[in-house]
């Protein structure tokens, strides 16, 4: 608990310094546009509160805070979709999947937690769309909704299972995962802006480059080396491999969400600009890093 408090205190101090620095730069250079950076910092503060609650308080508080995060991420995802009246029941059933998924986590039923959304929700989610007698755009509507539930609910809900699977190390492992994922995102973002030349998917996101990917991998692995003794029971080798795994899967998560957003918002530039500061943009990598990190740890370590 002491190491967790110190880590959260360092994150809080870093966010405070960044916030003050941005405020000073904005006053000094009022003609420059710092909107994107300001939005990022605001959402980081929100995420700090959510994950602070998830790591410091009881398992119930942790589950509720992460369920709320899943709800808002899914809500923002649905806001990007072109919907019809027939889709309303589909969305309602998707939201109802959140408390059910977190109930399986609460009672520690790993088997149902791991198959509920990929199997049962996937098979039965189309029913409300069929009952609504809407056939036009059926496949795109249902498949887009299923993608959202898989990423925003199934993927992110793995964050909640850490504490259930390992009461001793779970909270610290969540903090370790979130810190490395955010460090990876930030490093990739700034390296791509200042040094990026080879864009991975220029049509979806100009800020995802191969230079950013390589630089982010190096930085994330280094940060993993420095913080692992305080947050994990890992060896040096396991910590470095964890940093590498989180960086690579975070890259694929960010890339996937970027392409999804580009496809869903095609032809709607105004809405695409308004979602830049949303939590969906900050948790995109976690939708991939959370499940992969959890299952790798469960496979190689007995404490999970």
Image (cartoon, rainbow, N blue to C red):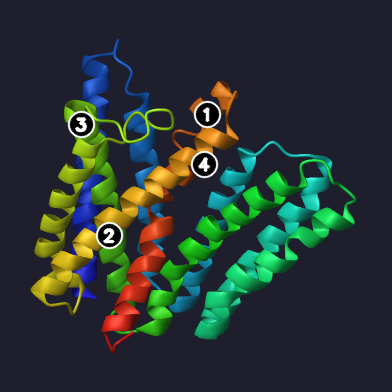
Q: CA distance from mark 2 to mark 4?
A: 21 Å
Q: CA distance from mark 2 to mark 3?
A: 29 Å
Q: Which residue is mark 1?
A: 272
Q: Is residue 244 left or right of residue 91?
A: left
For the N terminus, give its image quadrant: bottom left
Q: Which residue is mark 2?
A: 246
**Residue 17 x/y as whole percent:** 19, 40
For the C terminus, give its image quadrant: bottom left
Q: CA distance from mark 4 to mark 3?
A: 33 Å
Judge the density around disc 4: few (<14), some (14-19), many (≥20) Cα neighbours within 10 Å: some
Q: CA distance from mark 1 to mark 3?
A: 27 Å
First in sequence, mark 2 or 4: give its number. Answer: 2
Q: For this rendering, which residue is in front, 228 or 148?
A: 148
**Numbered mark located on residue 260 in the image:** 4
Q: Secondary structure at mark 3?
A: helix
Q: Is residue 65 left or right of residue 196?
A: right
**Numbered mark located on residue 21 in the image:** 3
């Amino acid at each position: 608990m002491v190491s967790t408090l110190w880590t959260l205190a360092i994150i809080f101090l870093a966010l405070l310094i960044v916030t003050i620095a941005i405020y000073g730069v904005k006053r000094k250079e009022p003609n420059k546009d710092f909107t994107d950076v300001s939005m990022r910092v605001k959402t980081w503060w929100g995420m700090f509160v959510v994950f602070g609650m998830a790591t410091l308080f009881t398992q119930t508080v942790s589950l509720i805070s992460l369920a709320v995060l899943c709800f808002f991420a899914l809500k923002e995802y649905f806001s990007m979709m072109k919907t019809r009246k027939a889709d309303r029941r589909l969305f309602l059933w998707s939201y109802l999947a959140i408390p059910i998924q977190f109930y399986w986590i609460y009672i520690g039923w790993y088997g149902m937690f791991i198959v509920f959304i990929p199997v049962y929700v996937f098979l039965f989610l189309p029913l409300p769309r069929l009952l609504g007698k809407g056939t036009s755009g059926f496949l795109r509507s249902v498949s887009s909704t299923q993608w959202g539930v898989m990423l925003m609910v199934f993927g992110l809900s793995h964050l909640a299972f850490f504490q259930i699977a390992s009461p001793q190390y779970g909270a610290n492992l969540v903090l370790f995962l979130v810190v490395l994922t955010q460090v990876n995102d930030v490093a990739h973002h700034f390296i791509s802006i200042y040094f990026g030349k080879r864009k991975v998917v220029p049509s979806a996101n100009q800020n995802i480059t191969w230079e950013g990917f390589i630089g982010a991998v190096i930085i994330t692995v280094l940060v993993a080396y420095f913080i692992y003794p305080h947050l994990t029971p890992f060896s040096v080798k396991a910590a470095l491999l964890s940093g590498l795994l989180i960086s690579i899967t975070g890259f694929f998560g960010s890339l996937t969400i970027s392409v999804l957003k580009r496809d869903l918002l095609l032809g709607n530039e105004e809405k695409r600009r308004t979602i830049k500061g949303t939590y969906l943009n900050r948790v995109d990598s976690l939708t991939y890093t959370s499940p992969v990190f959890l299952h790798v740890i469960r496979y190689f370590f007995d404490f999970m």
